Image: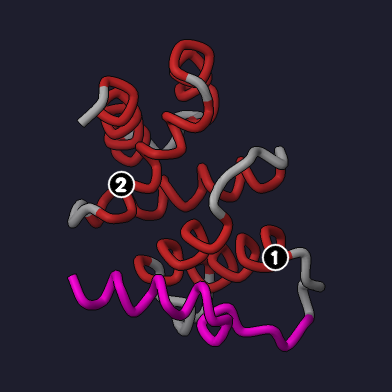
């Protein structure tokens, strides 16, 4: 595991424990040192991990990156968020998952688009479930 991924996971763990912290502010020095792509790899690693406590924080980082128009593998990001957050659970989790999907795919927020049926996302979800 690279230094950037390890450091990103550490920041996500700390931010998840302290609901008052600004995770994006805490990640900025890592982005400055390693670049966004390496930090994004760490965020994706968090969502692939079994550490349930950091999933929501990692998804929130993806949301911030989507708003900032940072480059990332949109299909992978959406698949990981839908894999780890329950899009059928009313409330914050479904809203965050849908917000990320609609922003990264460029579809209207009120669209009937379902990312779970989008072939490249569906394929990645199937691979994640098979692990």
Residue 22 part of the magenta-drawn span = no
- State the SS at label 2: helix
Q: Nearer the viewer, residue 13 or 46?
A: 46
**Is residue 83 toward the left or the right of residue 101 in the image?**
left
Among the two numbered marks 1 and 2 on one chain, the one whose residue lies closer to the N terminus: 2
Residue sitting at x 40%, y 71%: 124
**Is residue 108 toward the left or the right of residue 3 in the image?**
right
Residue sitting at x 30%, y 30%: 5
User: Residue tagged by mark 1?
Assistant: 105
Marking on residue 46: 2
Q: Nearer the viewer, residue 131 or 64?
A: 131
**Is residue 64 toward the left or the right of residue 86 in the image?**
right
Few, some or many residues within 10 Å of mark 1 (<14, 14–19, 20+)? some
Vertical order, 10 against 101 (above or below): above
Residue sitting at x 61%, y 84%: 114
- Magenta segment's dominant SS is helix
Q: Where is residue 75 in the image (x, y as percent from the top left)?
A: 54, 63
Label 1 and label 2: CA atoms lie apart by 22 Å
Residue 124 part of the magenta-drawn span = yes
How many tags in the picture?
Answer: 2
Q: Which of 120 and 42 is in front in this view?
A: 120
Task: Quarter of the image for the C terminus: give it.
Answer: bottom left
**Is residue 95 toward the left or the right of residue 113 in the image?**
left
Few, some or many residues within 10 Å of mark 2 (<14, 14–19, 20+)? many
Looking at the rendering, which quadrant does residue 110 occupy?
bottom right
- State the SS at label 1: helix
Range covered by the magenta-colored residues: 111-131
Q: Position of residue 8 (x, y in %)?
A: 34, 29
Marking on residue 15: none
């Amino acid at each position: 595991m690279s230094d950037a991924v390890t450091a990103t996971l550490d920041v996500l763990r700390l931010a998840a424990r302290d609901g008052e912290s600004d995770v994006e502010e805490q990640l900025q020095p890592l982005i400055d040192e390693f670049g966004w792509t390496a930090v994004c790899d760490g965020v994706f690693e968090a969502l692939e991990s079994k550490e349930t406590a950091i999933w929501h924080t990692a998804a929130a980082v993806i949301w911030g990156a989507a708003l900032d128009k940072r480059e990332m593998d949109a299909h992978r990001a959406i698949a990981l968020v839908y894999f780890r957050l329950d899009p059928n659970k009313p409330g914050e989790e479904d809203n965050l998952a849908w917000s990320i999907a609609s922003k990264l795919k460029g579809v209207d927020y009120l669209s009937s688009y379902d990312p779970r049926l989008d072939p490249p996302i569906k394929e990645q979800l199937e691979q994640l479930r098979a692990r």
